[in-house]
Every structure is written in structure tokens, then in C-alpha cells.
Amino acid sequence: MNANAGPSPAARLRRPLFQKVFAVLVAAVVLPLRASGASEAWFGYLDQRHTLDLQLRAEADAAAARIQEFLDGIPSQMNWTVQAPWGEGLDERHRIDMFRLMRQTPAIVDAVLVDGDGRERLRVSRTDPDVEMSEVDHSADPAFLGARAQRLWWGPVTLHRGSEPFMTVAVAGARQSAGVTIAEINLKFIWDVISAIHVGQTGQAFVLDRSRELVAHPDISLVLRGKDNPAAAPLRALQVAAAERGGGLVAGADTEGRAVSAAAKRIEGPDWTALVALPAAEAYQPIRAALWRTALLLLAGVAFAAALAYGLARRMIGPIKALEDGASHIGAGEFGTRIEMRTGDELERLAERFNTMAGQLALSQERSERINRLKRFLSPQIAELVESPGHERLLDSHRAVVTVIFCDLRGFTAFSAHAAPDEVMGLLAEYHRALGEIIVKYGATLTAYMGDGVMLLLNAPIPRPDPATVAARMAMDMQRAVQEILQRWRTRGHEIGFGIGIATGEATVGRIGYEGRIDYTAIGPVVNLASRLCSSAVDGQVIIDEATAAALGEMLPVEPLGQWSIRGFAEPAAVFALVHEGAGE
């Protein structure tokens, strides 16, 4: 009998109690989370679909409006050429009207002026010689007949020599005697509009005509394949579906076989359709993210329920979990995290120290962010100084005597025109790295990068003694460093030089820009003078103005270059060159 006896009452009660508490807590925590997650996913899907519909419709409307504006502008210009009636010959007014049409409408490649009987009187072209009074009969031309019947006729899209899409447009005068103007339109502008539209990360826009053939697509090769292109079949299906829905949100596939959501807008006149499509994988990414969040919350709920059940015997789990979660938030950069704990023991003390640490980290992060913003236009040591209490006012606008340094590469434009992109960027990387080390060494303020050009300031925003001398020594170091780099590039056959211009004088200095982007700069004649001197400097030369030369005195040798007439300045200016190793080489 004893052998068949079950477990003791204590053993029977202990395990079921934990399981029951765990089950109750799971039901109390997980079921509401599951219901909340399901409702969030469903209503999120509806909201996302509505938002997506509005977004795609807006993009399609914008694309269609730009294309419509482009197309409407062409007939309005052509109408001026069919105002006057025809006589026996070609009068000067018709010739002027056609030339004005070609000048004001760059999209027109060829234009033909036909009289009321369908005879060609004048043909002007951007690619072929103009022809007058050819008397070619256009009376049976669909463009002539369509314009006579409707005043405005839009032809089908064709491929010009298999390279670009074109379309014929014909406009008839109010009177039959005024004739018809027929023009061939290059549709490259449509491709430019479509290519510039970016929906999300991978969305696309495209245009189809009334016969469901591609007019424009970011992948121009799809357009150049011509009619009955099987790769465009999914786009035609989207056009049909969108037409049935009145342009509203439809589902389909793109040319790559991806499921997409799309909206459309009809373009009046040629009866085209502008469509904007976004892959469903990207469009409904927020929904998937919500589902993942719900799943994670469900898992967290199960873990929380298990912790509470076990916490009936192990009350320490709660405080420890709070500390652990707080550490996770701090690790994620949420320095506003605080832990409230009233246990009256070491854990409460630990929580207080944790909160103190979080506050100090928040202050440190704020200060670090301010310094990083300053480093966008100040050298690191100046940024650190300005961040110190009481120094930020140095960035306010005021008048100051500053030394301005401009420098750039000689022959860089020609070099960049024929050199490979990696060579161009490689040279700039070496060049900027070398200048950056010297700029930091001398504590100059970098105000602008302009490709190979650099503008620097000394004595602003931080006042410093003898800025002209510092600028001169810095310029000589820059010449030595850059010339070493350029020597290696010259051995590869590249003719590149480096010149510097320095001027000293009074300027307005301070912050400029807008919210989110602030720069520090100087404005005034001294800035223009330094720029002009830099432009005049030959390879290896450092040209300075009279004020800088006077400030140098006998500390550094200078060579007078005489009085120069400088663009933008009424009076000639005395100009000098720093004498240094390598100058003039």
C-alpha cells in the first residue's frame, strides 16, 4: 500500500501553487498584451494603408502636375505661330514666330509650319538645316488632320533613333487659313521628373500613355525597348487597376516581380497616367515592426509573470530587475532614466547612486553634444574653450581685426576633369588631412571647405596676439606639407600647384545660418582681398597684403610685388610675397 501511495500533501501543493500563480499571472499579463497587440496591428494596418494612400496620391499628383505644366506650356507657345493668315510666299512674321518658338521651348526638336491647304511652308530644326517653301503635302498627315479637327492634337510616343522618347504635337489656328504647326517634342524632361521622385527608400514613379506603353521610367532601358515590352506588363496591370479605382491605392507587382502598392493620376491632353509605386515590404514595415514589438512584449510578459510567481519566495528579484532595466536604458543612451526604490537597504542606496550616475551622464552628454556642434566650424581646442562657462558670447556678431587666409590648388579643375573619381577624391583626402593637422596645430578657425578651396580666420572668435605672424608661419607650414603631396602627384604626370592669399583688416564676424545648421564666418573687404590674393598666387607662393606685411615687420622676410589693381577695389593695393623655402618653384 505504501508503495502505491502518492506524494505527500506538501509536495502536491507546492508545485501546483507555483504553476497556478504562474498561469494566473500569465493570463493577467499576456492576454491583455496579446489583445492590445492584435488591435494595434489591425488598426495600425488600416492607418498605414490610409497614410500610404494619401502619400502615394500626393506624389502622383505632384508628378502629374509637373508633367502637365510642361506639356501645357508647349501648345501655348505654338499658338503664337498660327495667328496670321498665309499669303503667297513665306513672310517674315512667320519666320520670326518659329524662331521664337524654338528659343522659348527647348523641348521642341523640329517644328513644321503648314498652311491651310496642308502644304509645308517652313521647317526649323535643332539638328538639320532649316527648309523654306518645300511645298511638301501634309494634308493626309494624322497630325494635320487631328489638329484641324480638334485644334490641338497629341501624337503617340515614339523612339527617336532608338535612343530617346519623342512625341508629335500639332496646333491649328483659329481660322483655317492660319494653318497648323507640327512639332516633335523630346520627352527627356518627363524622365528627369520621374527620376527625381523618391518615395521611401525603394519606391519609383513612372508614366504610361493611353495605349499602356511606357513613356518614362527611372530605368530608361525599359522605355527604349519599345512597344509590347513584356517587362512592362506588370506596370500596365497597375495602370488598369488604378483606373478602375479612380487613381486610389492598388496592389500589384513591379518590373522586378516585387509586390507593390501604387496610386495614379491622369495627365490631361495626351491622356497619360502618372503612377507612383512603393514595395509592400517597405510600405508595411511599421506593421511588421508593431507585430515584432507585440511579440517581444508577450515574451516580456511571460518573463514578468514568471518573475512575479517566483518572487513570492524570492522578493529580491523585483529590485534587481529594476536595476537591470535601468542599466539597459542607460546603455541605450536614455540618461533621463531614474529608479524609484524604497526597500530601506543596500539596494535603495545602490538605486540612489545609479540615479546620480545617470544625471551626471546626462550632463556629460549634453556638454559633449554642444562641443561637437561647435567643432563643425571651430578647431577642437577652441570648441572646448567656447564651451567653458561665460565664453559662448564670443560667437556673437561684432567687428574685429582678423587675419583671413584663403588657399586652393592650381590646376585642380583640369585635373578633376580628366582624372578618375578615386584619384580626385584621393588627392583631396591627402590635401585636407595635411591642412587639417596644421590648422589644429595653429588653432585657426576653419569657416568653409569649397572643394579644393579653404577659408581660415585668426583672431576670431578667440582673440589672440599677433594673428598676422601666426598666419604667415601657418601658411609656410601649409606650403611645405602640400608641396610634398603634390610632388608625388606630379611624378604621375599631373600638373597641380598650391597658392595662398593672406589679408589683415577689420571685418564683421559672427554666426550665420539657420536652425539646424550654423556656421561662423567673417564678412568684409578684407575677406574679398584675401580671396583675390589667393587667386593671383602661383604655385608655391604666399601673397600677403600691406597690413599683414606691416604686422610681420622684421620677423619674416617678405618681397614687395608692387602696386596691384585688384578687382572689386577702387585703389591699387601694395602686395608682398612671403619668402620661404620652395616659393616660386
Image (tube, rainbow, N blue to C red):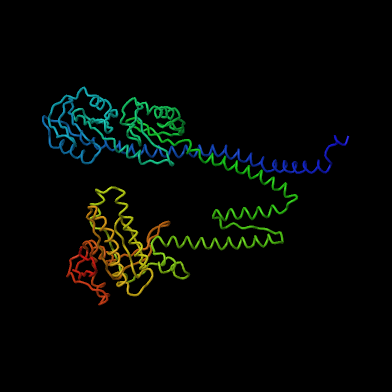
Of residue 497 and residue 386, the one placed in the foreground of this image is: 497
The answer to whether residue 81 is above or below residue 425 is above
What x and y, as percent, mark residue 311?
Answer: 72, 50
What x and y, as percent, mark residue 315?
Answer: 73, 53
Q: Residue furthest top?
A: 140
Of residue 313 and residue 94, the one placed in the foreground of this image is: 313
Q: Is residue 350 left or right of residue 395?
A: right
Q: Residue furthest bottom?
A: 554
**Residue 201 falls in which quadrant of the image?**
top left
**Residue 230 falls in which quadrant of the image?**
top left
Q: Is residue 19 left or right of residue 228?
A: right
**Residue 382 falls in which quadrant of the image?**
bottom left
What x and y, as percent, mark residue 5?
Answer: 85, 36
Of residue 542 and residue 445, the one placed in the foreground of this image is: 542
Image quarter (top left, top right, bottom left or bottom right) of the N terminus:
top right
Q: Residue furthest left?
A: 89
Q: Residue, x 45% and y 40% (percent of image)?
A: 55
The answer to whether residue 112 is above or below residue 452 is above
